[in-house]
Amino acid sequence: MKKRIFSGLLLGAFSLVSMAQVSNTLSPYSQFGLGVLADQSQGFNRGMGGLAIGLRNGKIVNMQNPASYSAIDSLTMIFDAGVSGQITNFKEGGRRVNAKTGHFDYIVSAFRLLPKVGVSFGVVPYSNIGYNYYSADYNNAESLSSSYFNVNQYGDGGFSQAYVGFGWEVIKGLSVGANISYFWGKYTKTVTVVNSDTYVNTLSKEYSTSVTSYKLDFGVQYQRPLDKDNLLTVGATVGLGHQLGAEALLVSTNYDNLNSITYSTRDSVPDAFKLPFTFGVGATLLHKNRLTVGVDYSFQKWANMDYPVQTTNVTPDHKLGYQLVGSQLLDRHKVTLGTDWVPNPTGRKYFSHVHYRFGVSYATPYYNVNGVKGPREFSVSAGFGIPLVNTWNNRSTLNISAQWVNRSADNLVKENSFRLNIGLTFNERWFAKWKVD
């Protein structure tokens, strides 16, 4: 039975890898930077707004701070997988549009490898790109015979990471850890200008890239009891930014509608993308093994990175320059507050073992939109952790959470999303030795 379950979970992991490039967003803001960044939370902390840096629990896989892996006990094998769906309302001026998306999000696993050493592996998203919209205008609005044109914008893709990590309790209360990830992804972004006048050429630009690289993240946690009722855990994480080595491509096409002739040019920018340096700190307080409250702060240094843009500068071969340009990206700051409450972990009633969760977060944008700051993000979430109890398993949990996310900025498109997240934490005592009298 265990072999079949393990094989099924491995098959799910490979399926997730193949699906990782399917976008989980329809936001027009995903066309900027590397797309809409994923919070990389799992089912256990999505109801807490993604709180993670200071969380330490042997019954969960907290991949956002690899130092937490050392908390897993020697009898446990944990698998965690999740799916999500969302409805988003886009508002611009007096117009509103609704859109729906759904996706298989992540799969992660963890187990104890050696005394005081835990290991984890899995696949999680890094960012998502997906949008499809158009705008229309007249070539000469003052003329009664003026023609109009449509600008169609389409994009698809995203970036993911498959990681292997370890956590080691160096001394009592102090743990360190690291995640080593294979980072990959691609995107295609197309802008097409179509005129109602068939004598006017159709113009198209296709921006694309394909990335295969690595990603390194490190974490530390220190846990200390304050008294018999309160346990404090503080943590920190660091992600090393580096050059991804990917080439940005631009193919410009000019289609002569009258003569049915196509003209194309190809431009490229080598070493066009980087991962930012990241830093995070967090703390949680566990009261009477029932109430957990915590706060996280994270920082991503994007502002010192250039981004490929087609500029009005003319190159020596008389083409518009496609080159790296500064001031396109911004440093990103995020603050998260979260809580988890279990009425009575040692009680006999079923509902006394249910986890009740709540969280809020606020994040600043990491990109500019037409020279102004992009939308800030505010979210509120709540959820439940429901124990799955049967004759052979009383440690697994069904995690259900709902999340409201608002992205807004002055004079830009406003987004309101409602997300439903479902995750299953399969926690089984695979390594226990059974005794038969």
Image: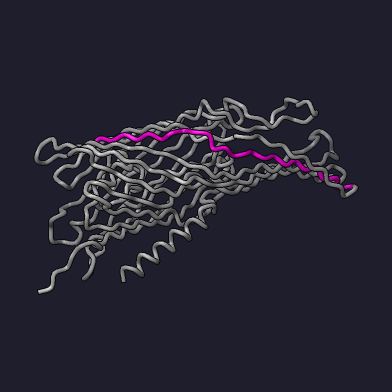
Q: In this image, 52 relative to 152: left or right?
A: left
Q: Residue at horizontal 22%, vertical 54%?
A: 74
Q: In this image, 192 relative to 158: left or right?
A: right
Q: What span is colored magenta in the figure?
A: 234-258
Question: Can you give x and y, in whole percent of width and height, for residue 55 in the image?
Answer: 27, 42
User: Principal SS element in the magenta part?
Assistant: strand
Question: Can you give x and y, in whole percent of width and height, for residue 283 in the image?
Answer: 26, 35
Up/down of 102 relative to 133, above or below = below
Up/down of 252 relative to 401, above or below = above
Give the quarter of the figure containing the N terminus.
bottom left
Q: In this image, 139 relative to 123: left or right?
A: right
The quarter holding residue 232 reads top left
Foreground residue, 31 or 242? 242
Q: Residue furthest front?
A: 114
Question: Can you give x and y, in whole percent of width and height, for residue 134 in the image?
Answer: 67, 45
Q: Residue furthest right?
A: 259
Q: Residue at horizontal 54%, vertical 39%?
A: 34
The quarter holding residue 353 reads bottom left
Q: Is residue 237 magenta?
A: yes
Q: In this image, 318 relative to 136: left or right?
A: right
Up/down of 375 relative to 50, above or below = above
- Counting every numbered tag in the picture gives 0
Question: Can you give x and y, in whole percent of width and height, for residue 390 in the image?
Answer: 23, 69
Foreground residue, 85 or 94? 85
